[in-house]
Image (tube, rainbow, N blue to C red):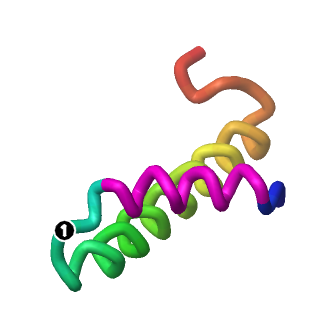
Amino acid sequence: MDQKYLEAVAREAAKNTKTEKDPSNFTEMQTKITFAVAINAKLDGHHGHDKHS
């Protein structure tokens, strides 16, 4: 992973942090997005074609 990119994402997210719960909400959202992308990539690779074909 590119550390500079992740730092830029973290800085952007920090701009929207207003409460002490915001960082955990960000982490939860990031985890859900990461798993969704990974699962979709695995499914696309498993079938050998795009899921929308």
Q: Residue 7: x, y in percent?
A: 65, 60
Residue that mark 1 sits on: 18
Instruction: Examine the rendered structure and indicate whether residue 34 appears above or below residue 51.
Output: below
Q: Residue 13: x, y in percent?
A: 41, 57
Quarter of the N terminus within the rendering: bottom right
Q: What element carries label 1?
A: loop
Instruction: Examine the rendered structure and indicate whether residue 2 appears above or below residue 18.
Output: above
Quarter of the C terminus within the rendering: top right
In-front residue for pair 13/34? 13
Q: Which amino acid does label 1 sit on?
A: Lys
Drawn side of residue 13 relative to residue 52, left or right: left
Residue occupying image coordinates x 61% and y 51%: 8
Drawn side of residue 26 relative to residue 42, left or right: left
Instruction: Examine the rendered structure and indicate whether residue 6 appears above or below residue 43.
Output: below
In the rendered structure, which segment of residues is drawn in magenta?
4-15
Residue occupying image coordinates x 42% and y 74%: 27
In-front residue for pair 18/42? 18
Can you tell which quarter of the image residue 51 is in?
A: top right
Residue occupying image coordinates x 48% and y 69%: 31
Drawn side of residue 16 relative to residue 38, left or right: left
In-front residue for pair 2/7? 7
Can you tell which quarter of the image residue 2 is in?
A: bottom right
Q: Residue 30: x, y in percent?
A: 46, 63
Q: Is the magenta stretch mostly helix, strand or loop?
A: helix
Q: Residue 39: x, y in percent?
A: 60, 55
Report the residue that reaches farthest toward the top.
53
